[in-house]
Image (spheres, rainbow, N blue to C red):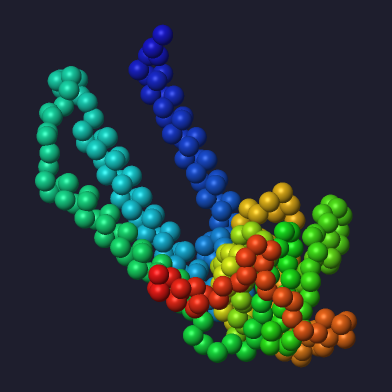
């Protein structure tokens, strides 16, 4: 049974008031968390620990601002059409039908192409900068992904460390047993990523970037850590049954502590480098692979 007009209008007002109160509560809660944690100004990303993190954060926040601007425009036009062209009592059953409108069709074709072009330009620019290895690194480390752990070759220091699969017991202290890679703060570190069996992905959330590790290839990127600390790392590519246990720690330390760690590894008979051959095919250097492709 249809409600009387007065009762239906009252119900709509109560519903509108409820939605408004809910929106205010959520906004205040968001402001509170923002004031304490400062997550809003950071785009709700992890706090970056490298020079490149600022570039990623700027691209992320800029993309969200553009998306919200487009969203507000679309929502505004939609609501305007709903209000301005709502059906009235004396209107015919159907509105006037139009076959086409050339200016509007051109508008909603050209504008999205322009938007995608701008987003592609800035994304490609930042991606090229983040993966550039043109500068000479201070430290070079080969990270080997394997099912389901990590090996680290400190090429600059001629030392290595072999990791074992994490044993997740659910008890405190598991982090201390994970493979741990050391890098010096304020120095340019180059990671040379290889895989020992299947595709893995080297991801430290505090870097705000990751890179895949593909058998038969060497992928590289460089970072300059800006603050000391211990950061969590993991594989970001589904690589088998125990993918969730493929964890590691990354410690950003002073140069003296980094050199001490290399000396400790050598004292533990870990001098030299682990082989970089994979279980299925030998490593193909990136440059050599390019030459082979171009030759064919």
Tell me if residue 154 can be seen.
Answer: yes
What residue lies at 46% left-to-right and 64% top-to-bottom?
61
Q: Look at the picture and state if 200 lies above or below 22.
A: below
Q: Quadrant of residue 250?
A: bottom right
What residue lies at 56% left-to-right and 53% top-to-bottom?
30
Q: How many numbered marks appear?
A: 0
Q: Position of residue 134 (x, y in %)?
A: 49, 85
Q: Quadrant of residue 160?
A: bottom right
Q: Along the line of sight, which residue is nearer the eye, 95 or 219?
A: 219
Tell me if residue 264 can be seen.
Answer: no
Q: Is 294 positioned to the left or the right of 277 in the image?
A: left
Q: Look at the picture and state if 138 lies above or below 101.
A: below
Q: Look at the picture and state if 45 lies above or below 223.
A: above
Q: Is 268 positioned to the left or the right of 289 in the image?
A: right
Q: Along the line of sight, which residue is nearer the eye, 109 or 45?
A: 109
Quadrant location of the N terminus in the rendered image: top left
What residue lies at 46% left-to-right and 29% top-to-bottom?
14
Q: Look at the picture and state if 47 lies above or below 113.
A: below
Q: Is 62 positioned to the left or the right of 206 in the image?
A: left
Q: Residue furthest front?
A: 296
Q: Position of residue 73 (x, y in %)?
A: 30, 50
Quadrant location of the C terminus in the rendered image: bottom left
Q: Position of residue 295 (x, y in %)?
A: 40, 74
């Amino acid at each position: 049974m249809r409600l009387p007009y007065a009762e239906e209008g009252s119900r709509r007002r109560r519903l509108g008031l409820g939605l408004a109160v809910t929106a205010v509560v959520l906004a205040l809660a968001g402001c509170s968390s923002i004031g304490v944690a400062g997550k809003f100004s950071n785009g709700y990303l992890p706090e970056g620990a490298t020079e490149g993190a600022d570039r990623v954060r700027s691209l992320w926040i800029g993309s969200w601002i553009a998306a919200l601007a487009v969203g507000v425009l679309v929502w505004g036009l939609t609501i305007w059409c709903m209000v301005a062209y709502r059906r009235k009592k004396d209107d015919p059953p159907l509105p006037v039908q139009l076959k086409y409108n050339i200016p509007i069709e051109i508008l909603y074709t050209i504008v999205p192409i322009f938007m995608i072009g701008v987003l592609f330009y800035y994304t490609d620019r930042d991606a090229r900068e983040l993966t550039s290895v043109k500068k000479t690194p201070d430290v070079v480390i080969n990270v080997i992904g394997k099912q389901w752990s990590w090996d680290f070759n400190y090429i600059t220091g001629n030392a290595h460390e072999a990791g074992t699969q994490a044993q997740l017991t659910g008890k405190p202290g598991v982090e201390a047993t994970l493979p741990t890679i050391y890098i010096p703060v304020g120095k340019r570190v180059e990671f040379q990523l290889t895989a020992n069996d299947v595709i893995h992905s080297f991801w430290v959330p505090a870097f705000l970037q990751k890179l895949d590790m593909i058998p038969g290839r060497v992928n590289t990127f460089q970072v300059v850590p800006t603050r000391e600390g211990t950061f969590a790392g993991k594989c970001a590519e589904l690589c088998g049954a125990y993918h969730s246990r493929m964890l590691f720690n990354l410690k950003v330390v002073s140069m003296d502590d980094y050199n001490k760690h290399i000396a400790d590894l050598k004292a533990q008979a870990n001098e030299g480098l682990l082989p970089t051959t994979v279980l299925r095919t030998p490593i193909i250097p990136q440059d050599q692979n390019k030459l082979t492709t171009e030759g064919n």
